[in-house]
Amino acid sequence: MAIVPLLMIVGGGVLYHVSQKATPAAVDPFLALSISFGIASLACLGIFVARQGFSPTQLHRVNWTSIVLACSLVAIESGYLIGYRAGLKLNITSFVCNNLIALVLLGVGTVLYREAFTFRTGSGMVICAAGLLLLLR
């Protein structure tokens, strides 16, 4: 059922950007993020334990990807929070960033993961790039 994760992503994304934009300027961004990360970490750990109980075996399966993902989360979260405080607009920032990410990932997926690059994919990429040019001018 692909609709459930899509709804989670879209709903979470809207709440994410609204809360980032509404975070008080008087609060240090890294304090606000550490509180958010702490609550999110506890929630994830609680869901993990509730689903299958604590499993030391699972800990041994964790690799470098968790560290890189953590670093990317800090970069994304602090980038949006600091960017919104610097005046980035809520109505286009996410669109611009997500399109730029999508354009980069088209290349990464094609080169590193050997995913198909079709005329349709290329056309979509050109349309996204044109949309970005229109927004950024």
Image: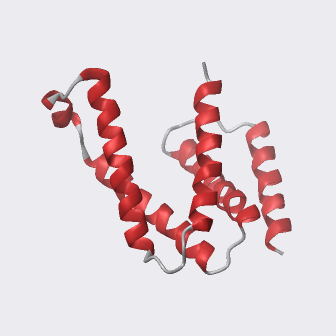
Q: Is residue 18 left or right of residue 71?
A: right
**Snapshot colouring:** secondary structure
Q: Quadrant of the N terminus?
A: top right
Residue in view at x 68 percent, y 74 percent: 88
Vertical relation: 40 (above or below) 46: below
Q: Could you say where residue 76 lies in the image, as x and y percent from the top left?
A: 50, 62
Residue in view at x 65 percent, y 59 percent: 100
Residue in view at x 75 percent, y 45 percent: 122
Residue farthest toward the top in the current orientation of the protein: 1
Q: Is residue 19 left or right of residue 123?
A: left
Residue 34: quadrant of the picture: bottom left
Q: Could you say where residue 99 lies in the image, as x and y percent from the top left?
A: 69, 55
Q: Could you say where residue 40 lies in the image, as x and y percent from the top left?
A: 39, 48
Q: Could you say where residue 124 lies in the image, as x and y percent from the top left?
A: 78, 45
Vertical relation: 66 (above or below) 101: above
Is residue 80 or residue 111 the one in the foreground? 80
Q: Quadrant of the C terminus?
A: bottom right
Residue in view at x 71 percent, y 65 percent: 90
Is residue 75 or residue 86 the one in the foreground? 86
Q: Is residue 126 left or right of residue 13?
A: right
Is residue 78 or residue 44 the one in the foreground? 44
Q: Is residue 136 left or right of residue 35?
A: right
Vertical relation: 125 (above or below) 22: above
Number of numbered discs on residues = 0
